[in-house]
Amino acid sequence: MDPGRAFIDRSRHYLVGDYLPKIRLCLDGLSTEDIWWRPNNASNSVGNLVLHLAGNIRQWCVSGIGGAADVRKRQEEFDQLGGLAGPDLLAYLETALSDVDQVLAALPTSELSATREIQGMKVSVLDALYHVVEHFSMHTGQIIYLAKLKSGRDLGFWEVKDGKAIPKW
């Protein structure tokens, strides 16, 4: 397989097939109050992080890579203090990821070395996609930590069989 296509396909897998199911399991186990709880004023809630992830992937992939208009209002992702329940947040994130996945599915590998301007920075498409995956991963980890902190439970991502960890999704 072409390394460029492998990179794009693996990125799509991480976003939709790995991080999203983990976030889904986190949201399923939290009340709306827990979703919007912040450990302190310098930290974000699970809800803020989900809004931030959706905004970031739209700006970097749908707009930056795909060429759609950039309509992101980044600060609003952090200013929101409640209002959306888990299913609504999940639907919002799933819609954003679906849009991203469509852009990436159609992305020619020849575009990976092309330059785009995103958030005032000139970056290659490859750099932009790499940023999106690592950024999404980091905030997924924060969401997992907050979900465990509030629920006090194992989120049940993995089942161990014959010494092998198997994802439950």
Image (tube, rainbow, N blue to C red):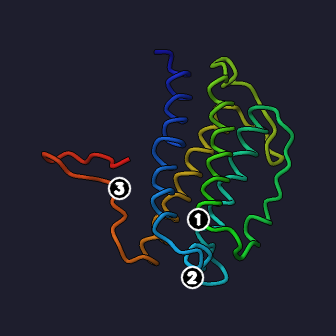
Provide residue 88's location: percent of width, then percent of height: 65, 60
Residue at figure coordinates x 59%, y 52% from the top left: 135
Which mark identifies residue 39? 2
The relative height of residue 164 versus residue 156 in the rendered view (above or below) is above
Task: Kindly identify the amino acid type of the residue bearing the numbered disc 3.
Answer: Phe
Q: Earlier in the sequence, mark 2 or mark 1?
A: 2
Provide residue 52's location: percent of width, then percent of height: 68, 59
The residue that disc 3 covers is 157
Foreground tag (3 vs 1): 1
Foreground tag (2 vs 1): 1
Residue at figure coordinates x 70%, y 51% from the top left: 56
Which mark identifies residue 143? none
Residue at figure coordinates x 53%, y 36% from the top left: 11
Give whichever of 35, 41 is nearer the camera: 35
The residue that disc 1 covers is 86
Foreground tag (3 vs 2): 3
Q: CA distance from mark 2 to mark 1?
A: 19 Å
Query: SS at mark 1?
Result: helix
Residue at figure coordinates x 68%, y 60% from the top left: 51
Task: Classify 10 Å Cα crowding around label 1: few (below 14), some (14-19), many (20 and above).
Answer: many
Q: CA distance from mark 3 to mark 2?
A: 24 Å
The relative height of residue 94 versus residue 66 in the rendered view (above or below) is below
Residue found at the very far left of the displayed protein: 162
Query: Which quadrant of the structure image shows residue 124?
Result: top right
Provide residue 4's location: percent of width, then percent of height: 55, 22
Q: CA distance from mark 3 to mark 1?
A: 18 Å
Left or right placement of residue 120 versus residue 153 in this view: right
Contact (CB < 8 A) between labels 2 and 1? no
The relative height of residue 35 versus residue 64 in the rendered view (above or below) is below
Task: Kindly identify the amino acid type of the residue bearing the numbered disc 1.
Answer: Gly
Query: SS at mark 2?
Result: loop
